[in-house]
Amino acid sequence: MRRGSADRPIEDMTMSDDGSGVEQGQWVTALYRAHAPALLRYLTARVGSATAEDLTAETFIVAIRRQEMFDQARGTGRAWLFGIASNAVREHFRREARYLRVLSRAEGEPADDEGHADTVADRVDAEAASHDWCRTF
């Protein structure tokens, strides 16, 4: 079991500022030191090394922002981090799928669509004509 400050297990560390536990930043730092290598290995196995580094950073950013949501009664800090990381992987694959759908829709469409340019020109002409019409009345 990894140890936090004052030789206490990280999972036993509380996140309070009243002296009964460690400062919030210290708690996340202790979690990082204890679990970042394992978290990186976990993410690398799922998404590859380059993306895993980004998702590891993203995981700790979420942990910092949501540290008040951690509930020791529901599990360990390690389990909480791996849950955040799993959600980050899921979101990564969702973004990839959306990106691929957009690319597949764009395939075959010409970059300079004359039909679109004609539609825009027609709308501009119609708007100009409507302004002229309004001025006559």
Image: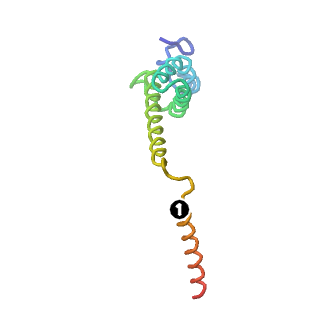
Q: Position of residue 133 (x, y in %)?
A: 57, 83
- Residue assigned mark 1: 116
Q: Quadrant of residue 74?
A: top left
* 63 in relation to 107, above or below: above
Q: Nearer the viewer, residue 91 or 59?
A: 91
Residue for point 53% across, 23% down: 49
**Does residue 117 appear to the left or right of 97 in the view shown?**
right
Q: Position of residue 126 (x, y in %)?
A: 55, 75
Task: Give the mark count.
Answer: 1
Q: Nearer the viewer, residue 59 or 66?
A: 59
Q: Quadrant of residue 76?
A: top left
Residue for point 49% across, 21% down: 39
Q: Residues within 10 Å of mark 1 (few under 14, many from 20)?
A: few
Q: Position of residue 129 (x, y in %)?
A: 57, 79
Q: Nearer the viewer, residue 34 or 110?
A: 110
The amino acid marked with disc number 1 is His
Secondary structure at badge 1 equals helix
Q: Nearer the viewer, residue 5 or 81?
A: 81
Q: Position of residue 41 (x, y in %)?
A: 49, 19
